[in-house]
Amino acid sequence: MGGMTLTLLLLCLSGTLSEDAGEDNLNDIMVQIQPEQGQDIENENKAHNQQVETAATTTTQSGCEPTIYTVMRELGAMEERLVATVRSLEGMRNRLEASESQVRSLNATVNELKRFNEDMPQVAFSATLGISGTIGPVSNEITLVFQRVLSNVGNAYNPTTGIFTAPVRGLYHFTFTAFDWGWTTMTGASLRRNGQVMVSVYDEKERGSSESSSNSATFLLQVGEQVYVALWRHGYRISDNENHYSSFNGFLLFPI
Ligand SMILES: *[C@@H]1O[C@H](CO)[C@@H](O)[C@H](O)[C@H]1NC(C)=O
């Protein structure tokens, strides 16, 4: 049956040619197209051909109409599917463009955070007195030198002078601990910023055991401002041994 439809379509299409092409040629074409078909079908086709030839020679194309209608309908359906596909592609393109724009924005944020992280100064130190013995009493307040460095990221702490110098303006946090052996001694020390007392420890005993005194503070430092721990004058001491009781620690919380 498929062969018949093809035959009809071919005849329809060649109908316009039939003025130029003789009927013999038309039959030649038929034979070429269906060379392997059986005798029965060939006979059937011949009968058909005669009908169609008659129709064709009497000029009307009425025999072709159902086939063309079918083809047109299929073309129409294909066009609908094509339109739907194009619409779906447009939707996808819009979504892709939105995603790309989002990726660009996120990438910009990531780059910004990366730069911020790279530019973020790293400042932190920790040091202990590093002596086995006692410092003090002293007649004039002295800056305590915590010589044994546990860490000194950014090298803002100087273990030779005991002075921390702010490399960037920012909020810093400091802690310090002063240890003494007790008995008849007292301990007292202050955390100073450029000479100004920020926090202190004070411990006075009539008799008794050893004791540790600690304090901590968080404050703003301008670039170059100095922080250190000072031992009070007039009778105060600070001690340490291999257990490292007395320490001075600090770090940058964040730049401002
Ligand atoms: C993200 O930004 C970096 C640096 O500007 C650039 O090299 C990279 O190509 C960007 N990536 C995307 C997906 O935009």
Image (cartoon, rainbow, N blue to C red):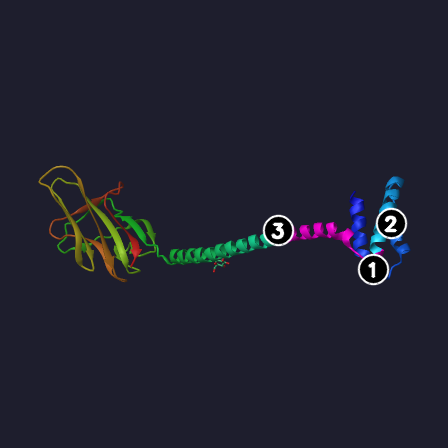
The front one of 121 and 29 is 29
The front one of 181 and 14 is 14
The residue beneath circle 3 is 81
SS of the residue under disc 2:
helix
Q: Nearer the viewer, mark 1 or mark 2?
A: 2
Residue at image coords 55%, 56%: 90
Residue at image coords 83%, 60%: 17
The front one of 66 and 97 is 66
Number of labels in the image equals 3
Q: Does the magenta stretch include residue 63?
A: yes
The front one of 125 and 173 is 173
- Tell me if the residue at label 2 has its CB under 8 Å from ligand 1: no
Residue 192 is at least partly visible in this image:
yes
Residue at image coords 89%, 41%: 39
Q: Please, what is the three-letter code of the amino acid marked with disc 1?
A: Leu
Image marks 1 and 3: residues in contact by CB distance under 8 Å: no
Q: What stretch is highlighted in magenta?
A: 57-80
The residue beneath circle 1 is 17
Residue 29: percent from left, percent from top:
87, 52
Mark 3, other Cα within 10 Å: few <14 / some 14–19 / many ≥20:
few
Q: Is residue 136 above or below residue 223?
A: above
Distance from disc 1 to disc 3, alpha carbons, whole Å, reads 33 Å
Mark 1, other Cα within 10 Å: few <14 / some 14–19 / many ≥20:
few
Q: Is residue 194 above or below residue 174?
A: below
Q: Please, what is the three-letter code of the amino acid marked with disc 2?
A: Gln
